[in-house]
Image (cartoon, rainbow, N blue to C red):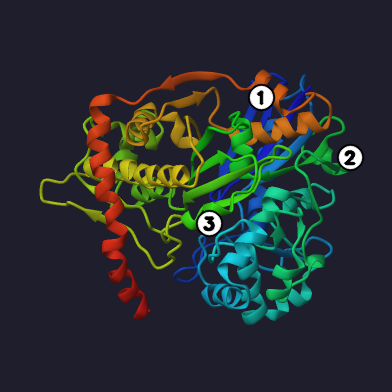
Amino acid sequence: MSLMGIDVGTTGCKVVAFDHNGQVLAAAGSEYPLLSPQPGWFELEPDRVWAQVQDCLRAVNTQLDSDPVTALSISSQGEAVIPVTRDGAVLANSPISSDGRNGAQTAELEAKLGVERIYRITGQNLSTIFTLPKAMWWRDQRPDILERSWKLLCYTDFVALRLGVEPVIDYSMAARTLGFDVGTLDWSDEMLAAADLSREQFARAAPSGSIIGEIPPKLASDLGFRGAAQVVTGGHDQPCAALGAGVLESGTCLYSIGTTEALVAVTGKPKLELQRYNIDCYSHVAPSTYFALTGNQTGGRLLRWYRDELGAHERVIAERDGRDVYDVIVEQVDDAPGKLLLLPYFVGSGMMHGDAAATGAVIGLSFNSRRADIVKAILEGLTYEQALGLRNLARAGVDIERLTAVGGGARSEKWMQIKCDITNLPIQLIHTSEAASLGVAMLAGWATGVYRDLPEAAERVIHVRKTLHPRVDRVAHYQRQLTRYEKLYAALKPVYQDLASEE
């Protein structure tokens, strides 16, 4: 018997089947295009996402003759919203977190409630990334979409619907809509009224690890399942990855290195003082636990941009040698700290400053600069941003003793050592980079009685393969560079504002 985790990300999906001890039995992944029909708009085509999830499900199930899946759960990117009819038809593409078209609607929420009240209710720092202002944009610009829709779903509940069960949303994903009260663990009528929306337009909310139904036999057979498969509520990909990395106790922190980069630090309870540092705080997928989230939505998309726009030479080498192009890109950097400073604000500043007008910048370029220097600036710049996030967590009273790295970037030990030196913290590398899929598989196992509780599941399935430690001779240099990096945004902010005023 096996447990399955489905992870629906911003640029691709993954389906992984695990045995009860956390070993991968089969896996499949697929990329889909991120659409940008206008500047500042970023969308996915939900039917295409679902089609590729189905392909991955079939690919995994064909490899599981002797280990059929008994239960599965779903993690996904946050915020992206899909309007569907009662029969499940999609009415529009889903704007993702970095879609910034809803500035006016975000400002409307601020005018009605104020950022402090919004944080007290939702645990979220107001910005354009959330589901509510995205739906409000449809309210203002495409009212026909809301009029025809039955529900506004996130990708966890959308995939559940397409699997033939009730589209239930868990507390962590509901929090990312900006319409959920993280104190009462229920939809906030105050937030929804401010957005001119209602709780009936969203899925029923339930704790992570709740059984919500069984895939109907005909659909299950079409997707390759052999026998009954229960569907269990999962959650937002970041806390799901934290669970899959064993980040369940105070002092531990997930460092997620995927399409976005994020830090997930366990707090135990809500901490209002985190608002001062633009850090969100809401329900973990583990019961009766909260976590703090900070991060940058540029993340690994920046390496993908380099691959597509500047990495023609590396792509040729990768194709010639049958290697992963990202390995080729990263291996060209030497071990010495870089001299360039890169501000990774390619889709706004992310959570640190909450500035949608901020853009990327590279400081220190000269005729001596090479492609490898730009790659190193990307690797370091993304990490400097998270190092500042760790500083802010500490200022708010969330002290971190170690990091556990997951995601595609965690496969590069060279990059992980750079991150270790910049953050000045030990970094654990676990046996799988697919922690979100493992986390929701753990939820599926807990819900169906495979594991007594989540700590027992973590002890059985999570294996640390290596721990990296900061190199003393590098830490001092990186701390000086971090101090310079911290000054960049303030120095460039007037330029960003001036540029934004002309748009």
| Mark earlier in primary sequence (3, 1) | 3
Q: Which residue is mark 2?
A: 217
Residue 382: % across, % down: 37, 45
Give the left or right position of residue 401, taking residue 86 as reference.
left
Query: How many labels sit on residues?
Result: 3
Q: Which residue is mark 1?
A: 458
State which mark lies toward you, 3 or 1. Answer: 3
| Mark earlier in primary sequence (3, 2) | 2
**Residues at circles 1 and 2 in contact by the CB criterion of under 8 Å:** no
Amino acid at the residue labelled 3: Gln
Amino acid at the residue labelled 2: Pro
Residue 433: % across, % down: 53, 30
State which mark lies toward you, 3 or 2. Answer: 3
| Mark earlier in primary sequence (1, 2) | 2
State which mark lies toward you, 1 or 2. Answer: 1
Looking at the rendered image, the quarter that the C terminus falls into is bottom left
